[in-house]
Amino acid sequence: MQTFHVYLETDNPTYSPAFRSIVQTLTERVKTDPVQITYKDVVHPRFTLFQFQSWSAAEYDADTIDFARAFVSLVLTEWIFQIKEPEIIEEMAATLLEAEEAEEEWPEILPYVLRMCEETGDQEASLIHMATRKAKVYRKLFDYLEEERQINLLGFVRFRLHEHWNDLFERVEAGLDEYLEDKQYQEFVDLLRYFISVQETKYPLVHVVPDLGKQFLLYDERGEEIQLDQLDAILSVGEQSCREEDYLVSALVTLAPKQIVLHHAEEKQALAQTINNIFDNRLRLCTSCTFCLISRRTLDVTKPTQL
């Protein structure tokens, strides 16, 4: 018979019920035959003691000797990720938000933090990432229980998972930074949209043609190239560090066109999104026309221009 004791402090009244629920769920899902694992808990004033016992109908062998230790480690891992980690994420975020004076914005920030912590952009990558993080914590618990048959769970969380929490803090910080960058960007876009809305139109139509030799070429409604010598002179000093989107937006704001046509749009989706965010319904997209041939690309006759 093998016995493991888990001590869980009762500071938070949700800890023990959540632990019992996880034990029940894993008992139903994880098959440990021929080893049988049972548990009982005893509530004390300051902690709950969860006792796991296992026995095998046959003699333990190399395959079955660690079944109980593996099961207990799995229960503890799930409790840490389901219950304790979200709590710690909020504690970390509260510290960072206080420094940024952004406590009230937590509901808007949370999706950014979760995306960083869970890598939710791609479902398959997210699952792999989460499995890897859980495997590291599981291994620490499994190794610990090889030498010790009792564990103070919150003590283990506080003192044995420094690397895990340091990594998590970096992800929470990155999520907050991304939120603040997006917020600043949106504020800048809103300001530009207002400026453009009250600005007098200077050109009825501007064609934006990405070019191999330059960042882009601009043409008016008559097909004549628009020269931006003044803007070029301003940006030439730091041309290498000037992003294409920034340069183009500066030019378009200066020209104040009533309508913008972006050519080779299929190759410039991010650029199209940036322009559309600022100029809204003034943007039209083109993938195949005379302007699209300027940079010596082959005309796709299956995608005739609508302009």
Image: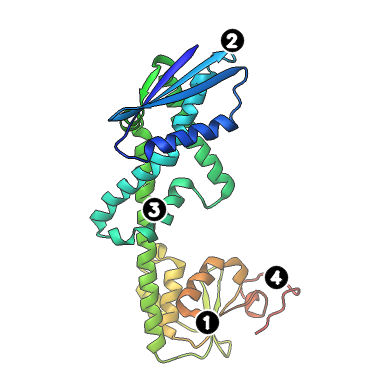
Residue at the disc numbered 4: 298
Q: Position of residue 248 (x, y in %)?
A: 46, 74
The amino acid type, in three-letter code, at marker 3 is Gly
N-term-proximal mark, 3 vs 4: 3
Q: Give the number of the mark in front: 2 or 1.
A: 2
Residue at the disc numbered 3: 175
Work out which quarter of the rendered image holds the C terminus and state it: bottom right
- Check disc 2: other Cα within 10 Å, few if <14, some if 14-19, many if 20+: few
Residue at the disc numbered 2: 61
Q: Please, what secondary structure does the residue beneath circle 3 have?
A: helix
N-term-proximal mark, 2 vs 3: 2
Residues under labels 3 and 1: Cα distance? 31 Å
Residues under labels 3 and 4: Cα distance? 42 Å
N-term-proximal mark, 2 vs 4: 2
Residue at the disc numbered 1: 281
From the viewer's side, name the closer residue of 171 and 54: 54
As drawn, is 202 to the left or to the right of 302? left
Mark 2 and mark 4 in contact? Answer it, CB < 8 Å. Answer: no
As drawn, is 61 to the left or to the right of 149? right
Q: How many marks?
A: 4
The amino acid type, in three-letter code, at marker 4 is Thr
